[in-house]
Image (cartoon, rainbow, N blue to C red):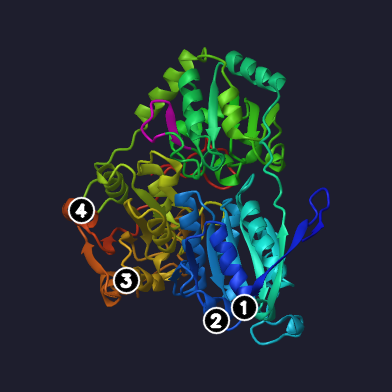
Amino acid sequence: MSGIVEDGLEKRFIDMTYPSKSGAQLLIDSLKEQGVDLIFGYPGGAIMPVYDVLPGSGLKHILGRHEQGCAMAAIGYARATGKVGTCLATSGPGATNLVTGIADAYLDSVPVVFITGQVPSDLMGTDAFQEVDIFGITLPVVKHSYIARDPADIPGMVEEAYYIAAEGRPGPVLIDLPKDVANATTTKRHRWRPYPKVKPKMGSSEHIKICEDMMRAAKKPLFYIGGGIAQGDGVKELRALVERTEIPVVSTLKGLGAMPSDHPHFLGMLGMHGLKAANFAVQEADLLIVAGARFDDRATGKLDTFAPHAKIIHMDIDIAEINKLRKADIWLEGSLKKNLAALNPGKSNADDWRKLCYGRRAEFAVDYNAPGDNVYAPKLLHDLTRRAPENAIITCDVGQHQMWVAQHCYFDDPKDHITSGGLGTMGFGMPAGLGAQLGCPERTVITVSGDGSIMMNIQELATLNRYQIPLKIVLLDNGVLGMVRQWQEVFFDENYSEVDLYDNPDFAEVARAFQIDAFTVTKRSEVDAGIDKLLAAKKPILMHVKISASENVWPLVPPGRSNADMMER
């Protein structure tokens, strides 16, 4: 044994001698050491040495039908389980097909390790067959990345990759593995000593006291929560603080579920398609307690008009988010879990404010008694989640149905709601759903998709069938690209350019061609029986729901406007 140890964050390793193994075998062994039990992937030339040693390894591999589907499945698995997801692909187009998934994981802070094959080291940089610089291509959308140069580095590299993906603010990590390194054998193991687990920071006692004083003094305080609550394991602490203070709460799209949807202090989602009670509360608040949110444009509307009267307390594990878009009066960096637990200002002296906020919530409650015989999507989604098992997971694509899910579905935990937030990736819902279902086989998982989105990764119906993954798919089909059509109606003088999907297939027939059970609902009177059939299914099933193309998502804050300027039906 020979030691090379350096201080700081430089690579540190101990050279150890073991039986000779190939780089590919060392990769598989290292994945098992990290507790990986499930890999989503698609084989090809440069990654073939890894697939050669995969059989008999004890690792379960799920063969997707497109690398993007594999990436989204790994994200769904990671978000549902809280573990680090794992995805495997080959070089060239295999690697580039992962890029959208890598970017999705980056923008939504999801821990996934992506492993790509690469052409042999001596061919790198020569424009060899199926060579791309995936290391360079993904630099803006990874938390960290590696190119393996020595098989002896692989055990330490993998250990560090999984550590980095999960620590602090989570995110994707890339390992690019040249084919010659995968094939090469070595008796050495460069066991990189992992960075010591740093005790999460939290705000100073002085800053905690200042925050408590501000919360006591505020007449119109409001919690503004985001996806960082779940990622920082702070759900329990948030709920306890809300109970202690009785301060109303609004949420971003990714923060949904951190407070139960029917909690007495919860006003709903804020922002472009936020609920009226939530948006009005933000605009009138005199104190915003921001926890795990980043002042995203879809939440704030026109930034200089957002919460114009409010002082800001900002809590986040990532110091880069603090003062990035909105100057905070005070901030608590580090562990949300610890900072939320430390705050104890007592019950807020804001009875009139609470009465106003909760009165508005009742005043602007949704009326689900829409006229006509057509299926009313908001009511269908509301009824579906009320009748689904208590711990059901909803995965969702992007478009009008995504906003209807956020507005009308019931969530009791952030892991119950999995959607593409930051990147807004169409084609996300079904592969994310199958990943979530494989990660949580004991739970009911429902994917809500649209006729535009489902076509982006419809090939994953074959994956559902191959592994008999009991995903329940609700496909809302309005025959158009609904959200684009709505914007063209409202902001582009009804110039409906390239949004008509008149030539859609019969999606129930498509599903049956993949040997997936499917049925179609066209009238409101058929919805209840359809929900019963969907929830009773023990195998993958698709409920194809025809809805009107003219039905839009309301309210809507026009771009560049204040959240108080909501357009309605």
Q: Amino acid at mark 4?
A: Val
Q: Earlier in the sequence, mark 3 or mark 4?
A: 3
Mark 1 → mark 3, Cα distance in angstroms: 27 Å
Q: Dots 1 and 2: beta carbons under 8 Å? A: yes
- Camera-side residue of 499 and 416: 416
- Above or below for 87 versus 163: below
Q: Residue 106's image quarter?
A: bottom right
Is residue 166 rendered magenta in the image?
A: no
Which quadrant of the figure contains the C terminus?
Answer: top left
Q: Secondary structure at mark 3?
A: helix
- Above or below for 340 versus 301: above
Identify the residue position indicated by label 4 in the image.
527
Q: Secondary structure at mark 1?
A: loop
Mark 4 → mark 1, Cα distance in angstroms: 46 Å
Mark 1 → mark 2, Cα distance in angstroms: 8 Å
The part of the chain drawn in magenta is 260-269
Does residue 286 appear in the picture of this structure?
no
At 64% across and 44% down in the image, what residue appears? 168
Number of dots carrying numbers: 4
Of marks 3 and 4, the one in the foreground: 3
- Camera-side residue of 456 and 411: 411
Q: Earlier in the sequence, mark 4 or mark 1?
A: 1
Identify the residue position indicated by label 2 in the image.
44
Q: Residue 455's image quarter?
A: bottom left
